[in-house]
Amino acid sequence: MKSDRDNPFRIAQEQFDRAAALLALPDNVREVLRVPQRELTVRFPVAMDDGSTRMFTGYRVQHNLGRGPTKGGLRYHPSVDIDEVRALAMWMTWKCALVNIPYGGAKGGVVCDPAQLSLQELERLTRRFATEVGIVVGSERDIPAPDVNTNAQIMAWFMDTLSMQQGHTINAVVTGKPVEVGGSLGRNEATGRGVSLMVREWARRHGRRLDQLNVVVQGFGNVGGVAAALLAELGCRVIGVGDASGGYVCRDGLDIAGMRRYAAHHPRRLLAGYSAPGVERIAGDALLETPCDVLVPAAMENQITDRNAARIRAALIVEGANGPTTPLADAILDERGIAVVPDILANAGGVTVSYFEWVQGLQSFFWNEHDVNARLEHIMVDAFNQVCDLAEQRRISLRLAAYLLAVRRVADANIIRGLYP
């Protein structure tokens, strides 16, 4: 059980409350926005390969529907609980509003360790979970996507299950699907690409040369690995990366392309066992405290807390993960002059291209990868500049500026729509 100070939903509410107070939102609007609108908990059986039956618990939470259907990923992880999913759904609401796409926020998950399941067991789990939550999802209601430990194949199973039940293909019921079954070009790289754009724009705004930036990335999966690769392509020196197997540091710069090839061909796509001249293995926790110019936490929430914030040695933090920094840590980082590009901005590339995929699926009209990336860049850069301009104008942190913009948009939508009945 998470402590109150590490409870992600309490953290999400605290972040919202601060923005709501500065916006002077009416009490009735605050009451609506600080809690999820719908929550579904399901417990379902899955037939295991050895002939036994095992029960699993899953969740789907919809935070707010004021700006459109809800949108949010599905994660498979042993630590999934209802408060984590509530927080992630709330953050998704603000994220969608900040980049101004017509969604509310949702999130879902199953308490499991996919590494302990065979491919057949994982498929059966996914199809049964899709059936259980199918009562609340739909292409015009709530559209899931990949998240921690889920991928395009799992989204294909999810879509196929609901399509078979309806008797026809429902292409837009999930995003993050394989391109062969209606996915969008550029979707797999979208979140990491958005992170790299935030670093590029911050450097441009502050007169920093990209080839003089040392970068550390925590997480080497679909977000961290892609971000590290794209930042290296931009000319940054990626001196540290890490995943569940630990941290890997080289002051002269890591061979990110080689490390990604290595991970792709090893169990669970981890870097365990990787070695190269000049590369030092360190503990995962120590990676966050490695001296650098840019730190990208792209793993899980609650990674930078009041217990380690004073030891962070970076000029900029770009939050590739959801909720990696607690409010107590935020205060310490702010006092130390460390800028933080918040998660609801930094990792919004994924949901932005998910929106593109959804639109393409509804219209059965697909774009090329250049168009997808160009549209993503336009939206992300515009949102970044809006946040930075407001932060400078109000002399507040980037996180608070992002929340003021996002919460205002969601509140306005709810006020204009009014209360039903």
Image: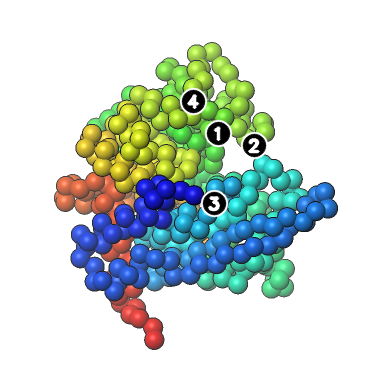
Q: Which residue is mark 2?
A: 268
Residue that sits furthest to the top in the current view: 277
Q: Earlier in the sequence, mark 3 or mark 1?
A: 3
Badge number at residue 283: 4
The answer to whether residue 274 is above or below residue 20 is: above
Q: Earlier in the sequence, mark 1 or mark 4?
A: 1
Taking the image as drawn, is residue 145 in sight? no
Local SS, label 3: loop
Residue 206 horizontal/vertical position (percent) = 24, 35
Residue 400 horizontal/vertical position (percent) = 26, 51
Quadrant of the image containing the C terminus: bottom left
Local SS, label 4: loop
Compare residues 148 and 175 and report the one nearer the observer.
148
Q: Is residue 245 left or right of residue 319?
A: right
Q: Which residue is mark 1?
A: 244
**Is the residue marked by circle 3 packed among few (<14), some (14-19), or many (20+) residues within 10 Å?**
some
Q: Distance between the Cα atoms at labels 3 and 4?
A: 24 Å
Q: Earlier in the sequence, mark 4 or mark 2?
A: 2
Q: Earlier in the sequence, mark 1 or mark 2?
A: 1
How many marks can you see?
4
Q: Is the Cβ of the residue at disc 1 closer than 8 Å to that at disc 2?
A: yes
